[in-house]
Image (cartoon, rainbow, N blue to C red):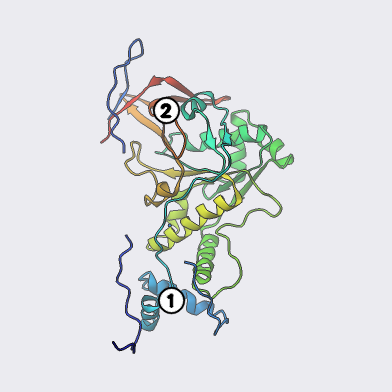
Amino acid sequence: MSTKKKGLKKDNSKHKHVNLSKRKVENKPKPIIINEKTTKINKENKQFNFQKIIKVMRAALNSDTSEDPKDKKEILTNPQIDVNPIIKNRKMPETGNIFNKTLIPGLDSLLVEGIPKGAAVIVCGGTGSGKTILNLQIMANACMQGKKCLYLTLEESELRLISHMNDFGWDAKRYIREEKLAFLRLNPFDIMRSVDALLAKEKGELLIDIKPVILPKDYTPEFIFVDSLTAISAAFIGRKDTYRVYIEKLFRYFEEIGATTFLITETAQIPKQFSPTGTEEFLADGVIILYSIQRQNIRERAIEVLKMRGVAHQRKVVAMRIVKGVGVEIFPDQEVFVKEI
């Protein structure tokens, strides 16, 4: 058989919720019916041609911004370039059975043992369902326990978030002074620059280490809150594969530093998908759903721990409310029946 090759062949390989049944509850109020290869370093050419890399990357993503067809051919025939990796299931961090309590009584009852240290948990729900408040409350309680927390935000300013915390009696400024709390405002353009550098790193064209997000210097958080994945995904319109690369790197990075992470996503009020692409919930260790369902002329709040990998938890939807000056209150004995649409 001849081993002569005219060129590399194009790789045509293809990269390969909750039906909650009604239960009869005795002596309780009437149920609420609510309709991610390591590449070889190019030793022959260590010059970093940034513009070429960006053109090649865009060509791989079928972007209209590529002017040279050779760029697209290069990316399609070069086996060292991986712009659409197979995202593998994420393993639970090995922390020796260390669990974090949220100090929200009803939620800790649902979680039973708590949230495993180093876990990544998606907190999803519709508009106004209480996602941000729940995360701020978990963060405030962690700060009170002496844990270092970092809140990454793309949507609300630091001042506004501090104001929200003050409304519920959580002294954000005190935690900041004690270096238990830090806020970091993320910019979509900075994220895109990080992605461009990450892709260059994947192709072996960039030798320096690149992180998907730059944390404050000399500050290693034990808890990280991301608000939100929905806002991050909006910066990748038309670049779905690039977004998947970034999210996989982001999850891996949080795992490397050992932080317990909560990531907010916006969904429908009764969601069938719990993240912008579905990839996020696959990578996550846990999924907590918040519901805000209209019942006649009012809205009823509810919460469910849908997934918590490797640990036992209660599998039911229960009532929840938000009380000013207190925060989220959860009632683990008051079940709410959700009818999927």
Q: Earlier in the sequence, mark 2 or mark 1?
A: 1
x and y percentages locating residue 146 in the rendered image? 69, 35
Q: Given the image, on which type of amino acid does mark 1 rest?
A: Val
Q: CA distance from mark 2 to mark 1?
A: 48 Å
User: In this picture, is 63 found above or below 26?
Assistant: below
Q: Residues within 10 Å of mark 2 (few under 14, many from 20)?
A: some
Q: Residue furthest top?
A: 27
Point out which mark residue 93 bears. Answer: none
Give the image quarter of residue 34: top left
Q: Amino acid at mark 2?
A: Gln
Viewer-proximal residue among 61 and 253 = 253
The quarter of the picture where residue 338 lies is top left
Question: In the rendered image, which quarter contains the N terminus?
Answer: bottom left
Q: Residue beneath label 2, please?
A: 314
- Looking at the rendered structure, the secondary structure element under dot 1 is helix
Q: Residue 242: percent from the left, percent from the top?
A: 43, 63
Decide which of 254, 326 is in the foreground and name it.
Answer: 254
Pointer 1: what residue? 56
Q: Nearer the viewer, residue 236 or 115?
A: 115
Q: Count the labels in the image.
A: 2
Vertical order, 206 against 251 (above or below): below
Quadrant position of the C terminus in the picture: top left
Residue 206 is situated, as x and y percent measured from the top left of the image, at 56, 73
- In the rendered view, tell whether residue 184 sits above or below residue 333: below
Q: Compared with residue 92, is residue 54 higher up or lower down, i.e. above or below?
A: below
